[in-house]
Image: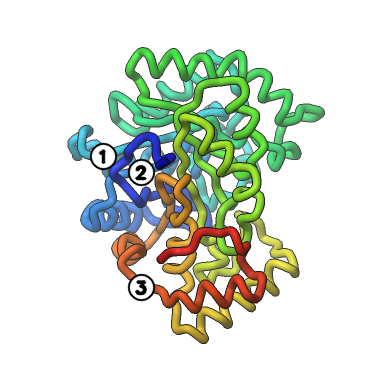
Amino acid sequence: MSTKKLNLEHKLAFGGVAIGNGFEEVSDARAQETLEAAWDAGIRQYDTSPWYGLGLSERRFGHFLHNKNRDEYVLSTKVGRILKANTGKMPETIWVNPAPFDYKYDYSAEAVRRSVEDSLQRLGVERLDYVFIHDLSPDHNEEYEDGVTWLDHFEVAKKGAMPELTKMREEGIIKGWGLGVNTIEPILKTLEVADPDIFLSAIQYSMVDHKDSIDRLFPAIADSRASLMVGAPFNAGLLAGKDRYNYQGEMPKEVQEKYKKIRAIADKHNVDLSTASMQFSYAPEEVDILLVGGSHPNQPKENMKFLDVKIPSNFWKELKAENLIDDRAVTPS
């Protein structure tokens, strides 16, 4: 039985990390050109966040989308951080020349309501399709205020953000909600205590790292009514040939070695590794949508072709034979 529960027509969504100056400074003009290229390529699903560039990504999406028919595209953003104007020293973040704002984690009902309203204004739209509770995850423990863990914030969200987003769904402000996280545990925990519609799981199902999703995430999604968007199939750049891994500056040695072996097999079979990475991450039945970003106009059109390219079956067989991908992993036929 199919687990693609939302029957979403879009296979590929465009993510807003790079548009928010996630890896380099992107000019307003190039951001606009890239979004125009995504639209012209046929992409009609977009995902952003107040966190991306401290509001910059949302503003750029809004500048582009406000001239489009709201019924023609799907739009999601995130909650969990409240932005406030900053006239002093800018906070240290991963963003290159972000908007002049500071932020505070807040997963309460009041903060989530305010965050959604702020996002609607930055985006210049009257409604959102999906809202993800952002970075409510153990990999952010060091970023929270002293002594507070993701579990503390989860308890706040369970009583605040989750019921408030359910209420907003009932009000028609959003179609649905879930979590946008880089680990699996928060998704499993949310399925136990709430009624989410869709999850965004980033960096957890790629050619480099996927066993935990097979073991725990996919069975939980299959047993639920929630849908799944998989993000960062390149592990934030690695599998697309960039010297980046999972939004971090440091790359573990074992990851480097695994990448080199995968790269060698791809070269042997004359396979474009970016395309293979996208096909791999979209292949499981549990995956409804693949989320890929971009900051150059040529990228969206190339990404939209990812399902059209035939990859030799021997490529996947050799990866499994060399134990580079899990033998249980679904590979494109």
Question: Nearer the observer, disc 3 or disc 1?
Answer: 3
Residue 48 vs residue 201, the one in the foreground: 201
The front one of 323 and 262 is 323
Q: Residue furthest right?
A: 147
Residue, disc 3: 310
Q: Residues within 10 Å of mark 2 (few under 14, many from 20)?
A: many
Residue type, numbered disc 1: Tyr
Relative horizontal placement of residue 250, taking residue 104 as reference (left or right):
right
Question: Residue sitting at 19 percent across and 39 percent down?
Answer: 68
Label 3 or label 2, whichever comes before in sequence order: 2
Name the quarter where the C terminus is drawn: bottom left
Q: Secondary structure at mark 2?
A: strand
Sequence order check, earlier mark of 2 and 1? 2
Tell me the distance, in whole angstroms, between the alpha carbons under discs 2 and 1.
Answer: 8 Å
The amino acid pointed to by label 3 is Lys
Residue shown at 38% from the left, 14% from the top: 170
Q: Tell me how far mark 3 sits from mark 1, CA to CA.
A: 28 Å
Image depth: mark 3 or mark 2 in front: 3
Whole-number angstrom distance, CA of label 3 to CA of label 2: 26 Å
Q: Which mark is residue 46?
A: 2
> Which image quarter holds the N terminus?
top left
Q: First in sequence, mark 3 or 1: give its number.
A: 1
Disc 1, SS:
loop
Residue 167 is situated, as x and y percent measured from the top left of the image, at 44, 13
Give the structural element (helix, strand or loop) at label 3: loop
Q: Amino acid at mark 2?
A: Tyr
Mark 2 and mark 1 in contact? Answer it, CB < 8 Å.
Answer: yes
Residue found 56% across the figure and 20% down from its top: 194
How would you rate the neighbour count of disc 1 (Cα within 10 Å): few for under 14, some for 14-19, many for 20 or more? some
> Does the CB distance between marks 3 and 2 fall below 8 Å?
no
Give the numbered dot on residue 73. Answer: 1
